[in-house]
Image (spheres, rainbow, N blue to C red):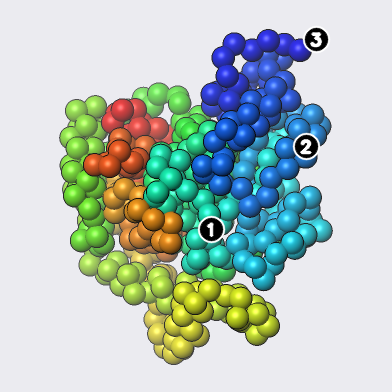
Amino acid sequence: MPQTVKGDPASFTATEAVRRIHDGRLRPEALMDAYLDHIASRDPSVRAFAHFDPAQARAAAASARPGPLHGIPVGAKDVLDTADMPSQYGSPIWAGWQPRADSAPVAWARKAGAVVLGKTVTTEFATRKPGPTMNPANPAHTPGGSSSGSAAGVGAGLFPLAYGTQTAGSVIRPAAYCGAVGYKPTYGLISRIGMKIMSDSLDTIGVIARTVADCALFAGAVSGRDLGDPDTKPEATPRIGVCQSPTWDTAAPETRALLARVADALGRAGASVSRRELPASFDALVEAHPIVMNSESARALGWELANHADQLSEGLRERLGFGLNQPQSALEHAYAVFEATQRAFPDAMDGLDVLVTPAAPGEAPKGLEWTGDPAFNFIWTSLHVPCVTVPAGTGPNGLPLGIQIVGRRGDDRAVLAWARWVEAAIA
């Protein structure tokens, strides 16, 4: 006989839903039905999916494997190949393309028992032209990008977990705009095999969820890493550096006020709080990042440029042209900046556990033709370090704001734990 579950199963965190499924108090099918109801009511005003088949989702839930993600619905950004769903990369060039195999992130999610619910909208090749997705807090505003459908879907309650990818700010910024938690791991923690890679030096697969603990659960299950339980209360309080970063001039008034308010709250909660800015040498990343990103992306899209350039958006063609026109000396210098700043970053954090910095310049911009500025993200992506954004209230127009927690490369478990501490301190 079907078990009865009190409350809406779609309101559970992924961590709680897994616990209930493991204990026999919730069936994967019941969890899926609850999310399908949410999708039917909310997705017409969000448009998170590039591909979605309710019958396929129900069948997948019924056959989900036991494991750390048993029965949990997952949205897969449409730059990750799926063997049973189209992979179109946000481009008409690849309309209807059906890969033969799952990408590694999708394969490992399924191996862990997750149910891939559908493919989520991405901007064109996770770079330029936005798709149709709208911000769940206000459909007149962007959800951010390029992980637009993943962030909006979690924010709207269409699924509890989703994959995103980040080359500049494409996990952290949309998660912040949509009131979700976003986790960009240390570069390479989650395998990129089977992803439509654009910038080999930058592209990082991350996750978006409702809670920090859910991010740790999901990323740990698919990467084979022990990322701990961020809900466990630490024995000490953190040493936090409040970092405006080299792009502070882009911060909107609400973000300037937010960072000051967060710093005060962290101090009241017992953290050792100090101001910590990156050395002046890190300013070179402002020019180095777009050179590397666009040069590598142009090389990655060689086939598309050679055969279907007319189906690339004008904005993307312009950026690819910028990348191709970079002299070898400029690209070599940009790589040297990456190497030098990555090597110097541990010293820049000396005496601290984490940095706290804005997740975005402000609220999600109005309109759907632009996904926002990654000014507060690309530096950390270039440094290959782990970042987490947690919800931090709302701005002047009632749209979500986020605050970003940054740590040392490879120190993901601690960064997740301190992100949870920060989230609780500012609640």
Q: What residue did someone put label 2 on?
A: 55
Mark 2: which amino acid?
Ala
Secondary element at tag 3: loop
Residue at coordinates 48% horizontally, 34% vertically from top-left?
A: 210
- Sequence-earlier tag: 3 or 2: 3
Residues at marks 1 and 3 touching, judged by CB atoms closer than 8 Å: no
Between the C-alphas of marks 1 and 3, the distance is: 43 Å
Classed neighbour count for the residue bearing mark 2: other residues with Cα under 10 Å, few (<14), some (14–19), many (≥20):
few
Residue at coordinates 63% horizontally, 29% vertically from top-left?
A: 37
Q: What residue did someone put label 1 on?
A: 131
Between residue 417 and residue 326, name the one nearer to us: 326
Between residue 35 and residue 231, name the one nearer to us: 35
Report which quarter residue 11 is drawn in.
Answer: top right
Q: What residue did someone put label 3 on?
A: 1
Q: Say left or right for 45 vs 358.
A: right
Between residue 407 and residue 320, name the one nearer to us: 320
Between the C-alphas of marks 2 and 1, the distance is: 24 Å
